[in-house]
Amino acid sequence: MFEVKLDTVRQLSESTKEFRFAIVGQGSLGYEPGQFYRFTFEDVQGVFQRSYSLSNLENQEGKHLDIIVSKVEGGRATSLLFNASPGMRARVTGPHGRLILPRKAPKHLFLIATSVGVAPYLPIMRRLENENYEKVDLFFGVRDRGEFIYEDFFKAYAEENDFFDFRLCLSRENAEAEYEYSGYVTDLLKKENLSPSGSLFLVCGNPQMVEDVWSFLTGRKFGGPQVIT
Ligand SMILES: Cc1cc2nc3c(=O)[nH]c(=O)nc-3n(C[C@H](O)[C@H](O)[C@H](O)COP(=O)(O)OP(=O)(O)OC[C@H]3O[C@@H](n4cnc5c(N)ncnc54)[C@H](O)[C@@H]3O)c2cc1C
């Protein structure tokens, strides 16, 4: 366990903020892109824990933890975080989690996310730039364009990396741009010509979406190890 101190806060959309924590004292992060840390916070009711995926694009092995948090109405941790000032302290354990890249690159990697479930894919995408991936598709589900966080990053990344493509799945707006799709990520997945051989799916976000994707893929003869949640 180590201590962190809130350094900066950045508003990403109406309901999401990015928090950068600095490690207090000695120590540095040793995590695999895609993993999460468990934060111990303290409020007037006492201490409590919540987990957050690392969204670090920089400082992959450094002394900062970046997290992207979606506001939950009446939520204990999110109320604390959304009202926090730089200097706020928390204790952290980790890294945890198996939403990470495999040792051997699959032929086709799918990154499936809704809302802030896209956070762990940011460090994963940084890592992908240095590896030999042939084809990577991000399906990012949001309610409307206002929730399209990191828009500039995803667009620039797709421009710069031939192996990468992304689709923004809008559940409450009509698609207009070529990269947009009207509907849920699961609907888009069902339209894909999926080949069980050589495909790997990382899935993160809304629990119902994760369950739907899991049921659909395992029902289509994808093995459990090919779907990481
Ligand atoms: C492995 C892991 C990684 C996670 N990574 C992230 C992350 O990167 N970013 C992030 O924002 N969250 C992430 N979470 C969720 C996070 O840990 C908290 O659960 C979330 O921030 C809500 O905490 P809270 O204390 O504000 O809400 P609570 O006080 O725990 O909940 C308040 C009420 O809201 C409901 N509720 C809780 N979460 C949601 C939700 N998402 N939508 C709607 N209702 C909800 C609860 O059921 C409860 O009724 C992750 C969770 C896990 C398990």
Image: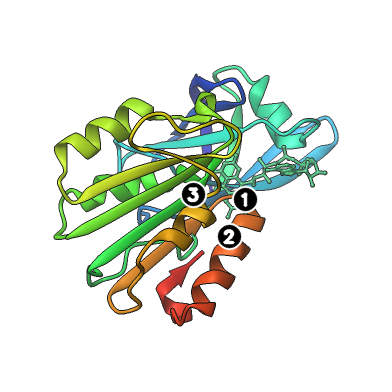
Q: Secondary structure at mark 1?
A: loop
* Amino acid type at image mark 3: Ala
- Disc 1 residue lies near ligand 1 with CB under 8 A: yes
Whether residue 200 is visible to the viewer of this picture, yes or no, is: yes
Location of residue 58 (image quadrant)? top left
Q: Residue at x 62, y 64 (%)?
A: 211
Q: Quadrant of ligand 1?
A: top right
Kindly identify the amino acid type of the residue bearing the numbered disc 2.
Answer: Val
What type is the residue that disc 1 sits on? Asn
Q: Secondary structure at mark 3?
A: strand
Examine the rendered structure and indicate whether residue 182 appears above or below residue 17. below
Q: Are marks 1 and 2 in contact (CB under 8 Å)?
A: yes
Nearest to N terminus: mark 2 or mark 3 = 3
Seen in the image, is 46 located left or right of residue 227? right
User: Residue 157 falls in which quadrant of the image?
Assistant: top left
Question: Which residue is identified by label 1?
Answer: 206
Instruction: Measure the alpha-carbon separation of dots 1 and 2.
Output: 6 Å
Q: Which residue is mark 3?
A: 113
Note whether 140 is above or below 14 in the view shown. below
For this rendering, which residue is in front, 5 or 148?
Answer: 148
User: Residue 78: image x %, image y %?
Assistant: 69, 32
Query: Residue sitting at 23 percent across and 48 percent down?
Result: 164
* Res 210 label: 2
Q: Is residue 192 above or below residue 2?
A: below
**Residue in the picture at 35% in, 37% down:** 179
Mark 2–mark 3 CB contact (< 8 Å): no
